[in-house]
Amino acid sequence: MLLGVLVIGIAQNAFAEESLETYIALDVESFSQPESKYSYQEITIFGHVEEYFRGDSISVTIVYPDETEEIINTYASKEGDIYTILHITHESQIGTHMVFLDYDAEMAFTTFEILENQ
């Protein structure tokens, strides 16, 4: 009887899990460039990789307005969640920046914009 109850409990938990699709997002979509070399803006990059295998590297590629690229290699949690921080300074390029999530292939993207100080 105890075994039967245990099996039912496991089955209920298995169906209760939500299936998240792969995505990447930012906590800010648009902001002004910091004015001083002593200040900066932090952007939080977060997302989820569906069917992530623990220990596999994930790449987040930032494509700047002048089309140069920066690649940030990171890892996800065992559930596939990613979280990383990007610092924007007074020297960061003004314009639209593209952010791509790569895990064996390009899987998702988003953008953010740095506006010129007025």
Image (cartoon, grey):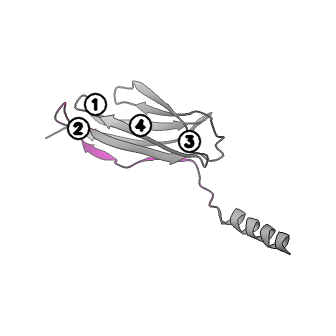
Relative side of 60 to 78, left or right: left
Pointer 4 residue: 98
> What's the residue at 62%, 47% (across, down)?
50
- Distance of mark 1 from mark 4, alpha carbons? 14 Å
Pointer 1 residue: 92
Q: Work out whether residue 112 or residue 48 is closer to the camera in this orientation and state it.
A: 48
Check residue 28 for magenta coloring.
yes
Of pointers 1 and 3, the one earlier in the residue sequence? 3
Residue bounds of the magenta highlight = 18-40
- Distance of mark 2 from mark 4, alpha carbons? 16 Å
Pointer 3 residue: 76
Q: Callout 3, which amino acid?
A: Ala
Q: Residues within 10 Å of mark 4 (few under 14, many from 20)?
A: some
Q: Callout 4, which amino acid?
A: Met
* Looking at the image, residue 13 lies above or below residue 49: below
Element at label 3: loop
Relative side of 60 to 37, left or right: right
Residue closest to the far bottom: 1
Q: Residues within 10 Å of mark 1 (few under 14, many from 20)?
A: few
Pointer 2 residue: 33
- Please identify the quadrant where the C terminus is shown: top left
Element at label 4: strand
Closer to the eye: label 2 or 4: 2
> What's the residue at 74%, 69% (across, down)?
9
Relative side of 51 to 44, left or right: right
Closer to the eye: label 1 or 4: 1
Element at label 2: loop
